[in-house]
Amino acid sequence: MRLLKSDKFNDKKILLIDKDVKNNNDRTWCFWEQEDGFFNEIVYKKWNTISFLSDGYSAAMDISPYQYKMIRGIDFYNYCFDEISKHDSIEILRGNIGDWVYENEVLNIEVDNKKYLFDNTILFNSIYLPKPSNKETIKLLQHFKGWIIETAEPVFDPANATMMDFRVHQQNGTSFVYVMPFNATTALVEYTLFTKDLLRSEEYDKEIRHYIQSFLHIDNFTIKEEEFGIIPMTNEQLLFKKNGWNIGTAGGQTKGSSGYTFQFIQKQSQQIVDCLIAKKPLDTLPAEPRRFRFYDNTLLEVLYYNKVPGSEIFTTLFKKNKPQQVLRFLDNETNLKDELKIISSLPTWPFLKAAIKQL
Ligand SMILES: Cc1cc2nc3c(=O)[nH]c(=O)nc-3n(C[C@H](O)[C@H](O)[C@H](O)COP(=O)(O)OP(=O)(O)OC[C@H]3O[C@@H](n4cnc5c(N)ncnc54)[C@H](O)[C@@H]3O)c2cc1C
């Protein structure tokens, strides 16, 4: 989208290969930002106040100058394909990509068992291929099921989104619910876990229903849509440059300790386009400061071995720090002084031991 909208690449040919047609509302992206972003036109809903709830601390927090925003997958796909249809320079090939390799600088891609050769071509890859684990690899799954529900009576406060509600039981590991109200009668209610294994399908449903009835006190509702997703949370180093240029989750843009990805992708996409426009080599792209990966890996280690329950970690983060500072930290945009303040608010020994192990 950034390549197309820049109008600087109209003399280049772009080929987009994907196995899916992308005509389903298969995901909902939530993220925060201070100003209007590149996809502002399709933001479905935004909130100035977010709530954090747990047994130890609950607060509705004004996050200005940030806003918490939501983009629906289907709006995103339609918006992008509409833009694509306006450009002759881009072609779409629907098919399943097998292997790809550069042979003497010629890109060789297999799509639906057919070979395609391209010379003088830059490849951007979004297919996440996890590396085989070794004893240092930590792999947690962020898995979630969400229902968009509608009620007959107005029950939701459309001005307030619940970012995390940890009051649900923690028997399976770090578990919370978020509630994104679209209006007084419609909301996305999503049950989320950070654990090693998935639940059985009916368990997610049982937990969402229980939350709606026991915490939201809603008995009568209709399920309008459902979504299910898995996001890898890992200390595995996913490289930008490897057999082409890896972008998105495949290129390490998923934050290992939180699963947030959307804004990291936006930041990196802009940097890639700026780099191409400036005719600079792509390996000069600014990398995230390495200390953030270290923080993520430390937090992952603590979560993976359950040294401190996730509910306690997030409760402490929000109780002892300003929400804006927590959001900035989760965006990898804090400075060392802010980070020391945030880190010192967490339980020292478990984090120190995990940090030494990750070092
Ligand atoms: C349900 C869900 C909700 C999420 N919500 C949030 C959120 O709220 N906030 C946030 O920050 N992040 C969220 N994420 C994480 C992340 O933002 C998304 O996963 C995002 O879509 C990642 O973008 P991507 O380009 O890396 O991968 P994708 O969007 O998954 O794109 C990969 C593309 O590759 C195609 N593909 C894969 N394999 C092949 C193949 N063999 N041949 C051809 N094509 C192939 C797929 O069809 C797909 O179009 C969510 C993820 C999911 C799954």
Image: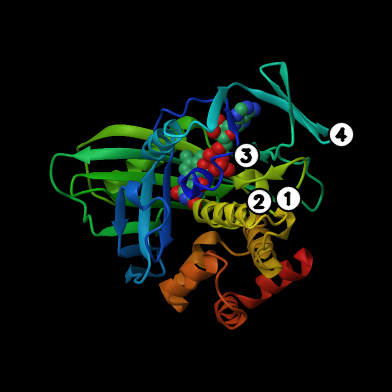
Q: Amino acid at mark 2?
A: Gly
Q: Are marks 2 and 1 in contact (CB under 8 Å)?
A: yes
For badge 4, the amino acid type reads Asn
Q: Quadrant of residue 187?
A: top left
Is disc 3's CB within 8 Å of ligand 1? yes
Residue 304, picture quadrant: bottom right
Question: Is 349 left, or right, of 148 in this rendering?
Answer: right
- Label at residue 126: 3
Which residue is found at the position 53% from the left and 33% from the top?
Answer: 89
Residue 169 shows up from this direction: no
Question: Which residue is label 2 attached to?
Answer: 252
Q: Are marks 4 and 1 in contact (CB under 8 Å)?
A: no
The mark that comes first in sequence, 2 or 1, is: 1
Identify the disc placed on residue 104: 4
How far across and down, in percent of the image, does residue 160 sit?
27, 60
Q: Could you tell me the amino acid type at mark 3? A: Ser
Q: Whole-percent x and y of residue 229? A: 50, 38
Q: Is residue 270 above or below residue 187?
A: below
